[in-house]
Amino acid sequence: MSVMNGLDLKIKEAENQLNQTHETIRSIRQLLSSNENEASCEDRQHKRDIQADKEAVRGMLDKQASKGLTKEIKELLKKFGAEKLSDINPDDYEDLYYSAESLDK
């Protein structure tokens, strides 16, 4: 009987290791899946119409300039490392837009 108990113990250990391996594989699949989701989100962001975004920012800057906020706009552009709108990185258009929008508040 002790041989059978020993064999049973070895089988249970193997089952535990197999279960741990399955759990590790599930975790890796989840990580890979979340990385793919992040990549697809980044792809959607890059598919934005950069020219339309730039025009929206330009419109907001013009609106704020017409309110007499030219100095503040120039300071804002400098915060983004630019002298003019064409120097702005397109990835920063959204932040610039909302920053400009908040100038008169």
Image (cartoon, rainbow, N blue to C red):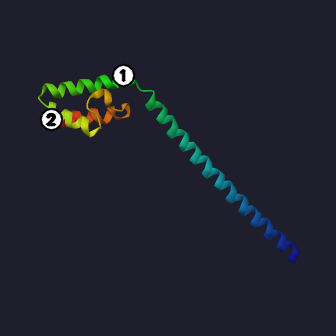
Choose between 43 and 82: the one closer to the eye: 82
Q: Considering only vertical position in the picture, is 66 above or below 76? A: above
Q: Considering only vertical position in the picture, is 33 above or below 87? A: below
Where residue 60 sits, quadrant-wise, is top left
Q: SS for tag 2?
A: helix
Count numbered badges in the picture: 2
Badge 1: few (under 14), some or many (20 or more) residues near its Cα, within 10 Å? Answer: few
Q: Earlier in the sequence, mark 1 or mark 2?
A: 1
Q: Considering only vertical position in the picture, is 38 above or below 56? A: below
- Residue at (63, 50) in percent of width and height: 26
Where residue 65 sits, quadrant-wise, is top left
Q: SS for tag 1?
A: helix
Q: Going by the image, does 86 lie left or right of 37? A: left
What amino acid is labelled 2 in the image? Answer: Asp
Choose between 10 and 47: the one closer to the eye: 47
Q: Going by the image, does 82 lie left or right of 90? A: left
Q: Position of residue 48 (x, y in %)?
A: 41, 26
Which residue corresponds to mark 2? 104
Q: Going by the image, does 12 lie left or right of 51? A: right
Quarter that holds the N terminus: bottom right
Which residue corresponds to mark 1? 51
Q: Considering only vertical position in the picture, is 2 above or below 103? A: below
Q: Which numbered dot is residue 100?
A: none
Quarter that holds the C terminus: top left
Q: Position of residue 21 (x, y in %)?
A: 69, 57
